[in-house]
Amino acid sequence: MARQDLTLIYARTKSDAEIAIAQIRQKYNLPAYLMTGIIEGILSRLKDEAIIELSASADRYAEAVKQEAEEEKGETDVTFTNKSDS
């Protein structure tokens, strides 16, 4: 599948979510204040997941930077060793 523009994905996802919420609200005949509570609970869980995802991403990035720095240091050490052997 070809990569889609993030704006298009956002618009489709938002539309699908709004339709699903309207269908659920109609199916269960829920008042807006109850739907708000349900959605806020779901949003809270999503925020927690986002924090975990961002933290894991930051950890992966920090590890990649650390590894790259160690590799560069190793290359520098080899260069100095080779020059001093001459």
Image: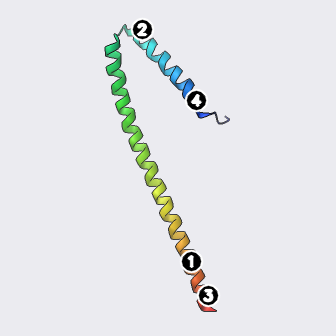
Q: Identity of the amino acid at label 2? A: Gln
Q: Name the residue under label 4.
A: 9
Separation of residues labelled 3 and 1 (CA atoms): 11 Å
Task: Work out which quarter of the rendered image holds the C terminus and state it.
Answer: bottom right
Left or right, 77 with respect to 38, comes to right
Q: In this view, does 60 lie above or below 27?
A: below
Counting from the top left corner in percent of width and height, residue 15 is at: 53, 20
Q: Identity of the amino acid at label 3? A: Lys
Left or right, 60 with respect to 42, comes to right
Q: Name the residue under label 2.
A: 26
- Which residue is depicted at the point 58% across and 29% down? 9
Q: Identity of the amino acid at label 4? A: Ile
Question: For the residue carrying disc 4, how many other residues have a C-alpha within 10 Å: few (<14), some (14-19), or many (20+)?
Answer: few
Left or right, 61 with respect to 33, comes to right
Q: Mark 3 points at which residue?
A: 83
Separation of residues labelled 3 and 4 (CA atoms): 55 Å
- Which residue is depicted at the point 55% across and 71% down? 72
Precedes in sequence: disc 2 or disc 4: 4
Mark nearer the viewer, 2 or 4: 4
Question: For the residue carrying disc 2, how many other residues have a C-alpha within 10 Å: few (<14), some (14-19), or many (20+)?
Answer: few
Counting from the top left corner in percent of width and height, residue 31 is at: 34, 10
Q: Mark 1 points at which residue?
A: 76
Q: Identity of the amino acid at label 1? A: Thr
